[in-house]
């Protein structure tokens, strides 16, 4: 019997919560208030509490969360921000939006996360911040990163877009640096029903500045203190996120169970490199990413078995057309390039059924 497995099921999670989402929708409709307001305030308080930080500021999306943090710290033209060479391009774009220059460093090849050992060497007198990403939901080695960064007077801004509920030495991602940007893009562990994002921080002045920047630079309507942006969290999305936040830990636990099954089933397959979980890490398992030199053949084999896979990410930012002007040649960041050619993301999620999990497990085993 052939079980077809989509890479990501966007229907089942919302069917499970249909009644609660319906109630949330009607609450917003009845309130008749559609920009910022109580629903956004309530989500901000609940998410700050979840992450364990003093402040949360809801914004339009994850890219804007990072961009507004950089702006609020006064980072701009002439400044450098250290970023991973192997990340989603949004991490780099946030730096570019602020007018600063992204300075890539290579990852730890075991965890795919920013390697603290490469950090110090990339710091120059122009460096203002470092932007580690908790890639695939695995927390980066934040104590080491924060220590080096703070020795050099740099801000540490977490890209927590893939790490809702991930823990580092028992502490939640999003509260491990000076500030963090979250995305609630629908496919993330905590996803809205459209675009949404948030900034989390313990830094009151930073939270205040981001609040100003997200809303046209004004605290009082029509009094514009700075040239701000329009990047506000939508109250309808805030209402949906409040529902889904209540299920995040349970859904992350289901992801963990799938990851455990996969790890147990595939350990010992020669040449197949499985995700490495550091002793300090409790991953959120946003993605389950394996590595193999015959990645394309493995992907084809799975496609023929009706199993959806994706590549995160096929082109590293430094080789993308968007960053042509920086003139990076192939070979500049060999690890990022090797990973782009050999990584494969397999289906994982809270609604992946046991037969679906078994189909993925068997199909991968068949290939070897
Ligand atoms: C999803 C994502 C973002 C951007 O989030 P959007 O809400 O789509 O703007 C940024 N960084 C990483 C690592 C992401 O995965």
Image: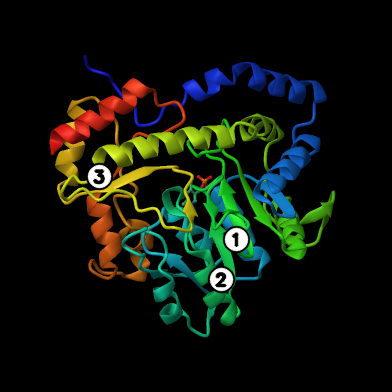
Determine the residue positioned at 32% across, 21% down. Answer: 355
| Vertical arrangement, residue 312 with respect to residue 82, above or below | above
Report whether residue 100 is seen: no
Q: Is residue 277 left or right of residue 297?
A: right
- Which residue is at the front of the view, 261 or 45? 261
Please identify the quarter of the rendering in which residue 351 is found.
Answer: top left
Q: Position of residue 43 (x, y in %)?
A: 72, 39
Mark 1 residue element:
loop
Residue on which disc 1 sits? 176
Mark 3 residue element:
loop
Determine the residue positioned at 63% across, 35% down. Answer: 245
Q: Position of residue 230 (x, y in %)?
A: 67, 48
Tell me whether the residue at label 2 lies in contact with that at label 1, contact meaning CB atoms closer than 8 angstroms: yes
| Vertical arrangement, residue 303 with respect to residue 168, above or below | above
Q: Residue furthest top?
A: 1
Determine the residue positioned at 33% across, 50% down. Answer: 275
Label 3 near ligand 1 (CB < 8 Å): no
For the residues labelled 3 and 2, the Cα–Cα distance comes to 33 Å
Label tally:
3
For the residues labelled 2 and 1, the Cα–Cα distance comes to 8 Å
Q: Which mark is residue 245?
A: none
Q: Is residue 109 left or right of residue 364?
A: right
Closer to the chain start, of discs 2 and 1, is 2
Tell me whether the residue at label 3 lies in contact with that at label 2, contact meaning CB atoms closer than 8 angstroms: no
For disc 2, the neighbor class at 10 Å (few under 14, some 14 to 19, many from 20) is many
Q: Which mark is residue 267?
A: 3
Closer to the chain start, of discs 3 and 2, is 2
Q: Which image quarter is the C terminus in?
A: top left
Q: Residue furthest bottom?
A: 125
């Amino acid at each position: 019997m052939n079980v077809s497995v989509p890479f990501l099921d966007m229907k089942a999670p919302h069917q499970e919560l249909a009644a609660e989402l319906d109630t949330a929708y009607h609450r917003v409709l009845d309130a008749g208030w559609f920009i910022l307001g109580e629903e956004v305030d309530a989500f901000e308080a609940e998410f700050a509490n979840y992450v364990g930080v003093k402040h949360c500021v809801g914004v339009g999306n994850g890219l804007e969360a990072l961009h507004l943090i950089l702006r609020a710290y006064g980072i701009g033209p002439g400044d450098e921000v250290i970023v991973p060479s192997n990340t989603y391009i949004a991490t780099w774009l946030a730096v570019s939006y602020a007018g600063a220059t992204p300075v890539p460093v290579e990852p730890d090849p075991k965890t795919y996360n920013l390697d603290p050992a490469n950090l110090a060497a990339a710091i120059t007198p122009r460096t203002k911040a470092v932007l580690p990403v908790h890639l695939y939901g695995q927390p980066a080695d934040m104590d080491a990163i924060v220590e080096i960064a703070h020795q050099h007077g740099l801000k540490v801004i977490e890209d927590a877009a893939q790490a809702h509920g991930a823990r580092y030495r028992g502490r939640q991602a999003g509260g491990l640096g000076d500030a963090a940007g979250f995305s609630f893009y629908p496919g993330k562990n905590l996803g809205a029903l459209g675009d949404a994002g948030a900034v989390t921080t313990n830094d009151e002045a930073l939270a205040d500045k981001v609040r100003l920047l997200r809303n046209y630079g004004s605290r009082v309507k029509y009094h514009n203190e700075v040239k701000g942006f329009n990047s506000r969290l939508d109250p309808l999305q805030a209402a949906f996120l409040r529902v889904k936040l209540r299920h995040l830990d349970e859904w992350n636990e289901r992801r963990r169970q799938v990851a455990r099954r996969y790890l147990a089933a595939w350990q010992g397959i020669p040449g197949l490199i499985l995700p490495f979980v550091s002793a300090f890490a409790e991953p959120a398992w946003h993605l389950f990413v394996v590595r193999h030199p015959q990645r394309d053949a493995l992907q084809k084999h799975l496609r023929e078995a009706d199993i959806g896979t994706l590549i995160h990410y096929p082109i590293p930012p430094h080789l993308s057309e968007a960053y042509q002007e920086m003139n990076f040649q192939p070979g500049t960041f060999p690890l990022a390039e090797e990973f782009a050619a050999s990584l494969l993301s397999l289906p994982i999620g809270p609604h992946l059924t046991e037969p679906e999990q078994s189909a993925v497990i068997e199909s991968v085993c068949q290939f070897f």
